[in-house]
Image: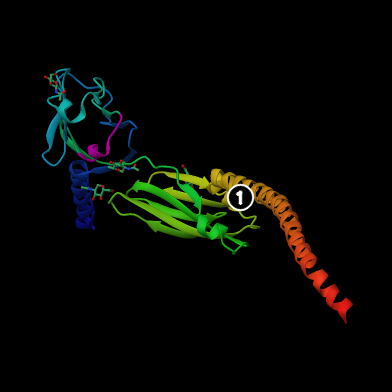
Amino acid sequence: MMSSHLCVLILFVLCGVFGDTDEVKSVSVTEGDSVTLNTDVTEVQRDDQILWKFGPQMTRIAEIYKHIIDMFDSNETFGDRLQLDSFTGSLTIRNIRTTDSGLYELQISSKRGNSYKTFNVTVYARLPVPVITSNSLKCSSSSVSSCSLLCSVVNVSDVTLSWYKGNSLLSSISASDLSISLSLPLEVEYQDKNTYSCVINNPISNQTKHLDITQLCHTCVVRESPLLYVLISLSVVILVICASMFHLCNKNNSGLEDEKSTSEYTQVIYSLQMKNLPQKSLQDVNR
Ligand SMILES: *[C@@H]1O[C@H](CO)[C@@H](O)[C@H](O)[C@H]1NC(C)=O
Ligand SMILES: *[C@@H]1O[C@H](CO)[C@@H](O)[C@H](O)[C@H]1NC(C)=O
Ligand SMILES: *[C@@H]1O[C@H](CO)[C@@H](O)[C@H](O)[C@H]1NC(C)=O
Ligand SMILES: *[C@@H]1O[C@H](CO)[C@@H](O)[C@H](O)[C@H]1NC(C)=O
């Protein structure tokens, strides 16, 4: 009975010790935002030393000791984006970049003893709004009842791109830590009255683009190239005008020529007949 209590006590002490030294707090933040790593110190005393280190080399980046703040050479990595609170010793990183991701170690030394804390900061890229386009080839083809769509994002990493019908997931595709472009197809009926949306998300945020079927699917030929459409219509009109004018001119011309040639022809025949007729008639008369 006694020994088990002792065991529990020892475990608690050990856990307490390990918890104090090995505590890793995960912090997720979106690129461009600010984040504050809290010391949980209410007021820094004169003899307290608060030291912040960063990166694989655990480079010293900020310190407060005897109420004096030292930022070391942190401006070479962070510029003026680092700020140390003189009352609490908390560290604020403004306009955070993906390169600021990593481990930040906090060491608090006071008369009461030392304590350590590690912050695992993960900076996620700001997500673009997905772009939905209709597949123009399928659009102008004979398949009139369905519409082919594509949802895309460029230059993304560690994201998932998904199509939702209402609240239910239809399909999705993921990108690893490599920065790539993603696209995901969707086939819908023109008459479909469901709400569709394309969503990009990472572990901390998402962006949604709702699908407007009537806008993307019905007028796709005109939307694809309105100028081409106008040009084609114009050339058809011009062609028709030209054709009819040509026909008219041709008709007039040929009509004149016909008349002329006909009359010449008639004249020739007449003259021939005139030459022949007397002989014939003479013969006839002779008979
Ligand atoms: C950092 O600050 C020091 C002095 O405060 C200055 O000499 C140095 O040029 C700065 N470095 C950068 C990269 O801004
Ligand atoms: C820090 O967080 C990242 C992302 O959550 C994880 O992959 C990594 O293993 C963590 N590192 C440590 C030392 O906890
Ligand atoms: C994609 O990212 C690279 C580097 O991160 C950049 O040079 C390029 O301009 C980006 N392209 C687009 C379309 O955003
Ligand atoms: C997108 O994020 C919001 C909160 O910002 C959340 O309520 C919603 O469920 C998320 N949507 C998806 C599809 O992850």
Residue 129, image x, y percentages:
45, 43
Residue at the far bottom: name it. Answer: 287
Foreground pick, 124 / 60: 124
- Residue 230 can be seen in this image: yes
User: Which residues make up the magenta segment?
Assistant: 95-103
- Residue linked to disc 1: 219
Secondary structure under the numbered disc 1 in the rendered image: loop
Q: How many marks?
A: 1
Tell me: 153 left or right of 163: left
Residue 62, image x, y percentages:
17, 27
Tell me: 186 left or right of 192: left
Within 8 Å of ligand 3, the CB of disc 1? Answer: no
Q: Amino acid at mark 1?
A: Thr
Q: Is residue 217 above or below residue 86?
A: below
Q: Is residue 89 above or below residue 286?
A: above
Foreground pick, 219 / 245: 245
Tell me: 192 left or right of 109: right
- Residue 112 can be seen in this image: no
Q: Residues within 10 Å of mark 1 (few under 14, many from 20)?
A: few
Based on the displayed image, in which of its 4 quarters is residue 46 positioned? top left
Residue sitting at x 41%, y 54%: 183
Q: Quadrant of the N terminus?
A: bottom left
The answer to if 79 sits in the magenta stretch is: no
The answer to if 99 sits in the magenta stretch is: yes
Foreground pick, 270 / 213: 270
Residue sitting at x 16%, y 39%: 55
Q: Quadrant of the C terminus?
A: bottom right
Foreground pick, 45 / 203: 203
Residue 227, image x, y percentages:
55, 43
The colour style of the image is rainbow
